[in-house]
Amino acid sequence: MKKRNGFPGRLARILAPSFLSALILLAAVAVAGEEGAPPKDFRSWAHSKSTVVADKANPLHGFHNQYVNEVALATLRKGGEYKDGAIFVDSVNAVEEKNGIYVPGAKAKTLVMIRNRKAETTGGWVFQAFDPAGKPMKIDPVKDCFECHQTGAKESGFVFHKYSE
């Protein structure tokens, strides 16, 4: 098939750099932890633990249910370095006390940690936070997340989770 006026080739040469630039921009935003939504199916993943952060002064105050995908679960069980694509999701609810028992209250936020070695400033992890409606929350991944992970979990690949049956 003969090209007329070189249009298809010329169009491809014009659009290719723009498309590549858009992909690079999207990747940079995702690595910064300000893009996306929590995985829709995370509650069907392995439930790795539940914790309560009772100190109301702690920014992570709440009832936490933590889930891991299959990629993360394999390393969580046996140890070693997490592969790209490992995901931890922390579903956080308010803490309510009913008759001396702490129970989950209203949905507070969802925290996501995704292994991506390209996220060099955060130890190879992308940190994201979402409000109760699933909309991205503005965070500073280094100050709001990684500094604590670096201080408290450096020996375990910046992951606080420990596997238990």
Image: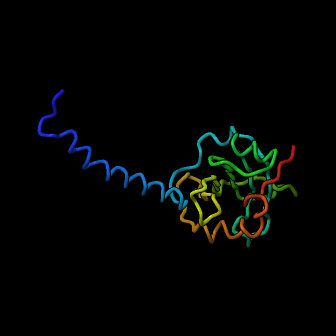
Residue 111 at x, y = what percent?
64, 56
Q: Quadrant of the C terminus?
A: top right
Residue 142 at x, y = what percent?
61, 69
Pick whichever, 106 or 73, lies toward us: 73
Residue 163 at x, y = what percent?
83, 48
Residue at 80 percent across and 65 percent down: it is 54
Colour option used: rainbow
In the displayed structure image, the side of residue 12 where residue 128 appears, left or right:
right
Residue at 71 percent across and 58 percent down: it is 94
Pick whichever, 46 or 60, lies toward us: 46
Q: Quadrant of the N terminus?
A: top left
Residue furthest to the front: 2
Pick whichever, 158 or 41, lies toward us: 158
Residue 130 at x, y = what percent?
58, 56
Pick whichever, 165 or 84, lies toward us: 84
In the displayed structure image, the side of residue 36 where residue 156 appears, left or right:
right
